[in-house]
Amino acid sequence: MAAIDYAGNAVISVLYVTELIDCWRRADGQVDVPPARTLRQRWLRVFGPPCLIVLLAVGPAHADERRNVVRVDVGLFSTVGFVGMSYGRAVTRWLVLEGGVGLGLTGVQLSLTPRLALGRGAQRFVAGAGLAVAIPTVAGYTGDPGYLRGSSALFLNVDLAGYEVSSPDRSLTFQAAAGVTTLVYSPGDPGLEGALYPQVRVGVGGWF
C-alpha cells in the first residue's frame, strides 16, 4: 500500500508541476500554442482543477496525523508579503488549505492558498496556487508603492516548487518555496495586470 501511495504522489507531482510550468511559459509568450490544441487546453483549464481536487480527496488524512499547522513566514512578493503568519488545515493526506496575513510592498496582504503536499513523514514536496488581496493602507500602515494609487489589488501567487522538513513528531517544521506572482486586478493601474514576477518564501512553525 505504501508503494502505491508513493507512486501516486510521484505521478500527481509531475503532472501538477509540468502543467504549472507550461501555463507559465504560455502566459509569458515563451511558446506558441497551435490552434488545434486550444480546445483541449480550455477543457483542461475548466475541468482539470476540480478533477484534481476530487482525486486528492479520495485519500483522507490518517486519524493519528497532526492536521493543523501555524508558521511565521518571511519572503519577497510572497502570499504574505515580506513577513506574516500562516495557518493551514490538512483537508486530506495531500491537500492543505492555507490562509495568511502579512505586510508587504503593496500593504497588508490577506491570502488563501490550496497547497499540494506530497510525501509522508518528515519530508514533503509542496506546491500550490492561490489569491492574495493587497490593501495599501490599513490602520495607519501605508504600503502603496505608487502604482496602486490607494486602491486594493488582487494577486495570483503560484508556488511552483517547495520543500517541507519536520521533526519526527512534526511539532517543528520548516518550509521553503519559490514560484511566480502576477497582478490579476488593479483599479489603480490596469496596465500592470498580467506581468510576472518571481516570489520566494521561507517559514518556521509547527503542526498540531
Image (cartoon, rainbow, N blue to C red):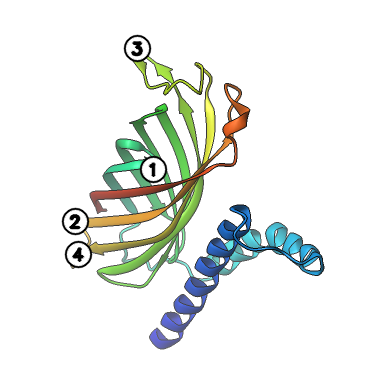
Q: Is residue 112 above or below residue 51?
A: above
Q: On the rendered image, what quadrant is the N terminus found in?
A: bottom left
Question: What residue sits right under mark 3 in the picture?
Answer: 140
Q: Is residue 11 above or below residue 116?
A: below
**Amino acid type of the residue that numbered disc 4 sits on in the rendered structure:** Asp
Question: What residue sits right under mark 2 in the picture?
Answer: 172
Looking at the rendered structure, the secondary structure element under dot 4 is: loop
Looking at the rendered structure, the secondary structure element under dot 1 is: strand
**Amino acid type of the residue that numbered disc 1 sits on in the rendered structure:** Ser
Residue 145: image location, x then y, percent: 42, 23
Looking at the rendered structure, the secondary structure element under dot 2 is: loop
Q: Nearer the viewer, mark 4 or mark 2?
A: 2
Mark closer to the chain start, 2 or 3: 3
Q: Residues within 10 Å of mark 4 (few under 14, many from 20)?
A: some
The image quadrant of residue 32 is: bottom right
Mark closer to the chain start, 3 or 4: 3
Q: Residues within 10 Å of mark 2 (few under 14, many from 20)?
A: some
Label 2 close to label 3 by CB (< 8 Å): no
Mark closer to the chain start, 4 or 1: 1
Q: Nearer the viewer, mark 2 or mark 3?
A: 3
Q: Residues within 10 Å of mark 1 (few under 14, many from 20)?
A: many
